[in-house]
Image (spheres, rainbow, N blue to C red):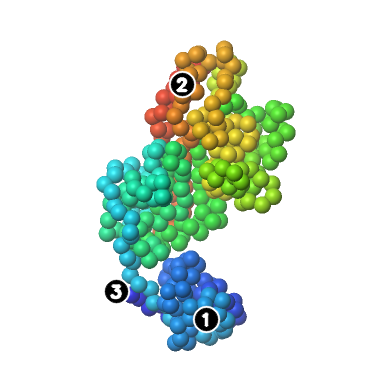
Amino acid sequence: MSHRRITFILGETPPKRLDKALARDVPEDAVLSRTRLAKLIDQGAVQVNGAIQRDPRAVVGEGAQIDIDVEEAQDSHILPEDIPLDVVYEDDDLIVVNKPTGMVVHPAPGSPSGTLVNALLAHCGDDLSGVGGMKRPGIVHRIDKETSGLLVVAKSDAAHHGLAKQFEAHTVERYYRAIVYGVPDANDPRLRGVKGANFESGNILKLTTQLARHKTDRQRQAVLFHGGRHAVTRARTVSRFGTPPVIALMECWLETGRTHQIRVHMAHAGHGLVGDPTYGGKRKLARTALPEALAQSIKDFPRQALHAAVLGFIHPISGEAIRFEAPLPADMADLLASLEKTRA
């Protein structure tokens, strides 16, 4: 199998550990992430002064010559599947898709096929130049199976590296639309008493907690205030429905991106998403707040009413700022149209 060799000299006062020194000094145009470098060390593809070094903790010094042999990207073990995709944007380095509800992003034991990755392998074909040593799409973020909306996926190692940095730095613009129970309001004394919740100017709800996998239900995330991972969500009310108001359309945006973040945060605030089987539940609405048929439609909504509507970032190759918007899917749009009629 053909490969390319990357050769460079460690600069002044490098970190003592090999893996950290490589991460600091590897040429930027090599586009090798820390994870990829760790794999290459383990595979025996890294030489220090002409000797193969497999120990990532090996001590290295200034002036050491580093040679890294990187094999050409291999074909992925994941099978391509001819599944239609709603492609919003595509170039040589990345693709932005509007994911439908019901589609898993990446194959897993419970979903070995029919995923976005299977579809992208078929759609992109030979355009994939390799991510992490494999000809596969570079997944830098995900949305839940039953959440619809925008995702950016890398087609090259360089794009994957650049996008991952932006997500890690929390500079990617991500706005969601959610239909929730109740109406968050700064004047609500109950909400003012929820730990981790506060309001910023403009009646913007800010939720700041730690999130971690639930101790007894591994499919859920739990709100914590010690341990776990830092999570910040902001939300503002776009529309309110019912007399009295019992349902709201919210615009939510992420400072961090954790599993189920919006769903678990809104539930923590007491405003779970309509249709969310894990966190939102099925709530009883005030009998006179909405017409009976509409209240039943809300109760029967088949999935969490959440849509990734806006995605903006700096193109990792061109440096151009780009931004995309995806309209609401039919199920959420139809429910909102019915709710709007009650306001006439």
| Figure quadrant of residue 281 | top right
Q: Is residue 253 left or right of residue 208?
A: left
| Figure quadrant of residue 132 | bottom left
Residue type pointed to by label 1: Leu
Q: CA distance from mark 3 to mark 1?
A: 28 Å
Q: Position of residue 69 (x, y in %)?
A: 39, 77
Residue type pointed to by label 2: Ser
Return the disc, 3 or 2, that comes first in the chain's sequence.
3
Would you say the residues marked 1 and 2 are in contact, meaning their CB atoms lie under 8 Å apart? no
Residue corresponding to mark 2: 297
Residue at horizontal 60 percent and vertical 79 percent from the top? 16
Query: In this view of the protein, which residue sits in the foreground, 135 or 88?
Result: 135
Residue at horizontal 34 percent and vertical 47 percent from the top? 113
Q: Which mark is residue 1?
A: 3
- Of badges 3 and 1, nearer the viewer stands 3
From where the camera sits, is residue 309 visible?
Answer: no
Residue type pointed to by label 3: Met
Q: Position of residue 282 (x, y in %)?
A: 54, 26
Crowd around label 1: few <14 · some 14–19 · many ≥20 (10 Å): many
Q: Quadrant of the N terminus?
A: bottom left
Q: Is residue 140 above or below residue 7?
A: above
Q: Mark 3 falls on what kind of element?
A: loop
